Image (cartoon, helix red, strand yellow):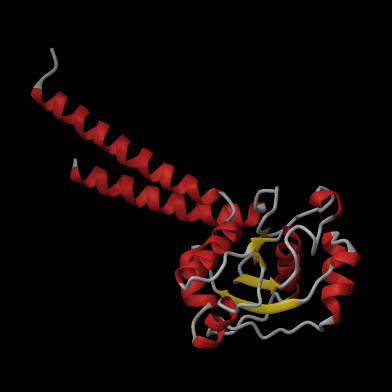
Amino acid sequence: MMTKKKKLCCCVWNLLLCHLLLATVVCSKHHGNPANDLVEIINQNRTAQKLPRLNDSPGLGCMALQYVELCKGNCSGNSAVNCKPPEDDFTEVFAPNCGVELPTIGTITGLIVGCQSKYTEPSLAFADVLVKDKKSLSVVRNKSHSEVGVGLIGFHKGPFFWCVLFSNGGTNSSFVLEDRGEGIKQKKGCYSGSAFPCNAGHRSAVLFNCVITLSCLFISMLIQI
């Protein structure tokens, strides 16, 4: 028969394993696509003001990723990106790199870009990095928008960049990707509406945060035994 001490020890270990399992499940939720999460946050903000939801455009999302990838090394201390590519880059660089069909390139009606020294959850990125003032909030709530795309990328030992592009194009008829984006060779970052998972760099950053969390929880539970 088990002694009371052994039973207590088993109960404690079972509780410890349950906590670790719960933390693991929470961490696993963040292995998706945070660009999609940010699109949903933007739409929630708009619908709260009785504005229509925006279509999630993979073409715009891919171009947003191209934008921030070009701006690496230009992150200031106040989350501002000191980088402004020429407007021609949208049609001559970003669109071709993404495989956007040229006849479907529409008008960019809004742009928000920001950066931070490390990865930030989409909800915090929205509030603390991208929409910090009335000017950027007015861009989110502009009535002329009909679609949105989000791109993000992190650099080794460098900051994370977020970019949001808005357009007034028609759903499924503007910024259309050739072969539905199957030909895109995405090596870095994430973009909204993509059928591809985030790159290894982003997954590693999130996984590292989860490992630290799990380790701290494990140690704290051992101390209580």
Among the 4 quarters of the image, the one containing residue 155: bottom right
Q: Residue furthest left?
A: 4
Whether 101 is drawn above or below 20: the answer is below
Residue 100 rendering spot, x and y as whole percentages:
84, 62
Residue 219, given in percent of the width and then of the height, sits at: 30, 47
Q: Nearer the viewer, residue 7 or 104?
A: 104
In this view, 6 is above or below 113: above
Left or right: 98 with respect to 14? right
Vertical comparison of 70 with 100: above or below: below
In depth, the one of 6 and 178 nearer the eye is: 178
Q: 141 or 31: nearer the eye?
A: 141
Residue that sits furthest to the top in the current view? 1
Q: Which quadrant of the rendered structure holds the N terminus?
A: top left
* Residue 119 visible here: no
Relative height, residue 132 to residue 207 (above, below): below
Q: Residue at x 70, y 74 (%)?
A: 72
x and y percentages locating residue 115 in the rendered image: 58, 75
From where the camera sits, is residue 5 visible? yes
Q: Which residue is rendered at x = 82% and y = 74% of the image? A: 90
